[in-house]
Amino acid sequence: MLIPNSSFEVLQDTKPDNVSLPAFMVSATRGFLPRMNPIVTLPPEFDAVETLLQAMPVQTLSGEPGLLATGQLGDAVLQELPDLTEQVEKYCDDLPMMNALYRDYSFLASAFLLEPCHMRFIKGEPYGLGKAFLPAQLSRPIVRCAELCGFKPFMEYAGSYALFNYRLHDPDGGMDYFNLRLIRAFEHGLDPSSSEAGFVLVHVEMVKNSGGLVDGAMASLSALADNTKNNTIAGRASLNAGLQTILAAARRVNDVMEGMWTKSKPRSYTSFRTFIFGITSQSMFPHGVVYEDINDGQPLNFRGESGANDSMIPLLDNFLQITMPDTPLTEILRDFREYRPSNHRQFLVEVKKASLELGLRDFALAVDVDARAGTVSEEEMQLVKESRLLWLELLNQVRDFRWRHWCFAREYILKQTSHPTATGGSPIVTWLPNQLQAVMEEMTEIYEGVGGRAGPMDLGAGCRDIMDLVERQRLTLRKEVDKYCQERGVGSD
Ligand code: HEM
C-alpha cells in the first residue's frame, strides 16, 4: 500500500522472517512496532556482551545485586570486553540481528557513561559528571551497528530501550501485557512488576495499538486521492470511515497510557532514569563524549532515550497539520524527529506532505461549505458535521495524550527532582506545555471557525463538553507553568 503521491510503502504483511529488511518499518498491522518480535539471544561470538549485560543491572534476574549496584560495570567493561567489531561485520546482511546488537551495545554504552552519576544519585548527591570517553570496544561496534541500522550511535527509544526490548514470557501467549518481559534493564526491570519494566512495557503496549493509526491515516489519505470519489459524498463518507479508524486506535492508546500510574510508580522513575539520559544539553556531559577511534577524537553529542522519539503523536501532528509555534522549543521537537528508525522518519515526512498536498484539513473541515450554500444536500451537510466532529475528536485525543503527559512530567519528574532537563535534553518545565498549548489553541480556533457551539452547524453537547474542558485546561496549564517557572527561576520560552 503506497502513501498517495509518494513511493513510500506501508506494509500489510510485515515479513517477519525476512532478514534483509530493517527491523523497523511501518505497517497497517503492527504499526510502529518492529516487523517481528525483538531478537533476544545474540550469536555465540558475543558471549562476553551477553555475560556483562546479564551481570549489569542493579538487580539481576536471579534477584542478586549486579555490577551497577556497586559501581563495577565500568571496570568490568574495560577488563572483560574484547573489541568484537569484526564479529559484528559477519552479521551485516542480517538487519534484525544488527538491531539486537545495536540495542545491546547501546545498553552497555549508557551504563558505562552514566554509572558514576548513578552512584552519586543513590547517595543523594547531584549527578556530577558522567564519563566523557567511550572505549573502543564499545565505540567501534556501536557506531557500526548504528550505521547499518540507520540509528544514531547512542541509545534510542525504538531501536533500543523500548520497542526492541520486549520478549514473550510464554512464546505462545501473544502480546498480552502480562506476558511481556524486558530483555535488558538497568535497574530492577528484569522483575516484571518493577517500575522500570512497567515504564517500558506501557510504551510497548501503547504502540501495539498503533496499527489502527497507520491504517486509518492511509484510508483517509486514499479517500482524498481517489479521483473518482474526490469532492463527492462517497469520498467524504470514506474519509469519515478512515478518521473513525484512527480515532478508535487513538482512544485505545490513551486508555493504555492511563495504566502508567499503577504499573510504574512516580517515586521510582528518577532512579532508573539516570541511565537513559542523553549526552546533549546535559550538565553531566558539558562537552559531549569522545568515542575512541571515531570522529578524529572530537566529542559527539546525542539526545537520550525519550518517548519524544515515538512516532504515534508525530503521525497525528503531521496528519492533522497541527501548527506549532515558532519558538526555540519547537526546534527541539524537530530535532527529536531525527532520532527514530529511518523508515519511520520517512513515513512521517511523506504523511505530512500528502496531507498538505491533498488539502486534507480543508476538506475535512469543509472550509468551502458556506460558499456552496444552497447547493449542499442535507446528506452532505450531515457528513460534513461528522467530519468536523471527528477532526476535533482526533485533536482531542492528541490533547488528552499531551495533557496526561504533562501530568506525568509533573508527578514523576517536577515533584521528584530539581534537575532542569529531561532525558532527551528538553527543558522540563516549558517544553511539553509548548506543544500542549498549541493543540488546545488549534482546537479553539477550529471550533470557533466552524461555528460548532450553536446554530445550524452545532457539533453537539459532547463537543461542547470537550471544548469547555479545553478552556479550563488552557488556564490551568498557564498557571502551573508560571508557578514552576517562578519557583525554578526559568523563562517561559
Ligand atoms: C512516566 C511516564 C513518562 C514520563 C515521566 C515521560 C517524560 C517525558 C518527558 C520529560 C518528555 C520531554 C522530552 C525529553 O525527554 O526531553 C517526554 C516527551 C514525550 N514522551 Fe514521554 N514520558 C512518559 C511516558 C510516555 C509514554 C508512555 C509515551 C508513549 C509513547 C510517551 C511519549 C512521549 C512523546 C510523544 C513525547 C513528545 C511530546 C510532544 O510531542 O509534545 N511518553 N516524555
Image (cartoon, rainbow, N blue to C red):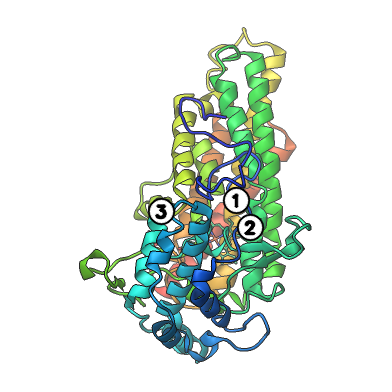
Q: Nearer the viewer, mark 3 or mark 2?
A: 3
Q: Give the residue type that dot 1 points to.
A: Leu
Secondary-structure class at tag 2? helix
The residue sitting at 63% across, 62% down in the picture is 166
Q: Position of residue 442 (x, y in %)?
A: 51, 40
Q: Nearer the viewer, mark 1 or mark 2?
A: 1
Q: Is residue 206 above or below residue 136?
A: above
Query: CB of mark 1 within 8 Å of CB of mark 3?
Result: no
Q: Is residue 241 above or below residue 435?
A: above
Q: Position of residue 304 (x, y in %)?
A: 44, 65
Q: Give the residue type that dot 3 points to.
A: Leu
| Ligand 1 quadrant assignment | bottom right
Is residue 12 or residue 387 the one in the foreground?
Answer: 12
Q: Quadrant of the N terminus?
A: top right
Q: Give the residue type that dot 2 points to.
A: Val
Circle on res. 148: 3
Query: CB of mark 1 within 8 Å of CB of mark 2?
Result: yes
Quickly name the residue at label 1. Answer: 33
Q: CA distance from mark 3 to mark 2?
A: 24 Å
Labels 1 and 2: the sequence-earlier one: 1
Labels 1 and 3: the sequence-earlier one: 1
Packing grade of label 2 (10 A; few <14, some 14-19, many >=20) is many
Q: CA distance from mark 1 to mark 3?
A: 19 Å
The residue sitting at 35% across, 80% down in the picture is 131
Circle on res. 204: 2
Q: Nearer the viewer, mark 1 or mark 3?
A: 3
Labels 3 and 2: the sequence-earlier one: 3
Q: Position of residue 340 (x, y in %)?
A: 46, 52
Q: CA distance from mark 1 to mark 2?
A: 8 Å
